[in-house]
Amino acid sequence: MEIVLYEEGTVNEFYLAHHAVKKEKRGEARLRIVFDGSSHEDHAPSPNVTLEMGPNLLPEILATLLRFRLYPVGIIGDTGHAFLQLSLHKRDRDLTRYFWYRGIKDKDGNYGTTREMITYHFTRLSFGLTCSPFLLSATIRELPDLYKAEFPTAAALVDNSTFMEDFAAGAENDDCVTNLHYELVHVMNQIRLPMPKWATNSKHLKEVWRTDDVDFKEITQILGIYWDTESDAFSMDPRDVISEYVEDLTTKRHLLQATARFYDPLGLLSPVSVVGKLLFQDTWFRGLAWDELLSDLGALWNTWVSTLPHLAHLRIRRCVGTVDRSHSQVHVFCDASERAYGAPLYIQSCMSTTTWFT
């Protein structure tokens, strides 16, 4: 951002509304600023109404995660604040103005604010604009064509393996994943898009990172799924679902909140989450109001909630790749009832006389 220098004749300007969002998780609270490109006065349109959204260039989350599971060695990277790495043209910057209080620092080095109002505008792309996801994806999508000759490995993966700020891919061995890492760093540096956060299950690459003083995590998240790189397994923290609802009176509203927080894009925990969804179906069959107690359904709810902490001990192997893909088969089983349906998928790998299912 930069301070706006007022000049006569400036007509293309808009002042973004902004507010703080507080997110509490496991006793820790974080504040972030949200700039609202959809907020506007009655007599004027908002920027998000006038801006084109652009086509959706993001890969599907499910497809990205499935590709991530195909190889013995996985690697993920996070660009972090990617939108703020893209510059706005000078003629467009006054459309992203906003007000802020002037900050001061006292003699003890602590920061505070005065009542003096200052006008800033963005010099980089704001997250709150409807076109921002497209512009970021379109920028990254240019990289494969520009650098496929110089960085063939990274160029082949960066398009379909990058979801917003997250990159997730795999390789056959330590040498391949190390080469992928270096190529990816060089490709992203071409557009000055650093990737400060990394994770991998490759012990060799971790040692390289320690030598190069590269920050990485042993336990992290890939598109919302917990990944323990040491054991190379996916896991779930049930506190993400039940933390603030267990002690509450059980209502239809609480039930919906809990089941909606059950994030499982791969469907690995469907046998558990479907129970909460069936209970929610029952509230509609009985015509319960949103804040009405669940009566006898409350006992079923409490039984289901009491089993959720056991999910903390569940570990699901990340890699489902097979050694010889030419001798692999995919088997899908489907079943349905009046209440729910499901379709588990298995990969059968035949190696000599041994058959493995993953």
Image: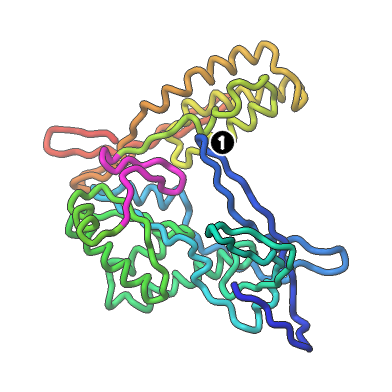
**Residue at 42% in and 62% down:** 79
- Is residue 298 magenta-colored? no
Question: What segment is highlighted magenta in the picture?
Answer: 215-232
Q: Position of residue 228 (x, y in %)?
A: 32, 40
**Residue at 53% in and 31% down:** 241
Task: Give the residue furthest to the front.
Answer: 107
Residue type at mark 1?
Answer: Arg
Q: Is residue 215 left or right of residue 8?
A: left
Task: Give the residue furthest to the left.
Answer: 352
Q: Is residue 16 left or right of residue 338?
A: right
**Residue at 36% in and 73% down:** 189
Image quadrant occupied by the N terminus? bottom right
Image quadrant occupied by the C terminus? top left
Q: Position of residue 102 (x, y in %)?
A: 67, 67
* Camera-side residue of 326 and 51: 51
Q: Is residue 165 above or below residue 90?
A: above
Q: Secondary structure at mark 1?
A: loop
Q: Residues within 10 Å of mark 1 (few under 14, many from 20)?
A: few
Residue at label 1? 261
Q: Position of residue 74 (x, y in %)?
A: 29, 50
Q: Is residue 153 above or below residue 333?
A: below
**Residue at 22% in and 34% down:** 356
Q: Position of residue 311 (x, y in %)?
A: 42, 26
- Is residue 228 magenta-colored? yes
Q: Is residue 330 left or right of residue 282?
A: left
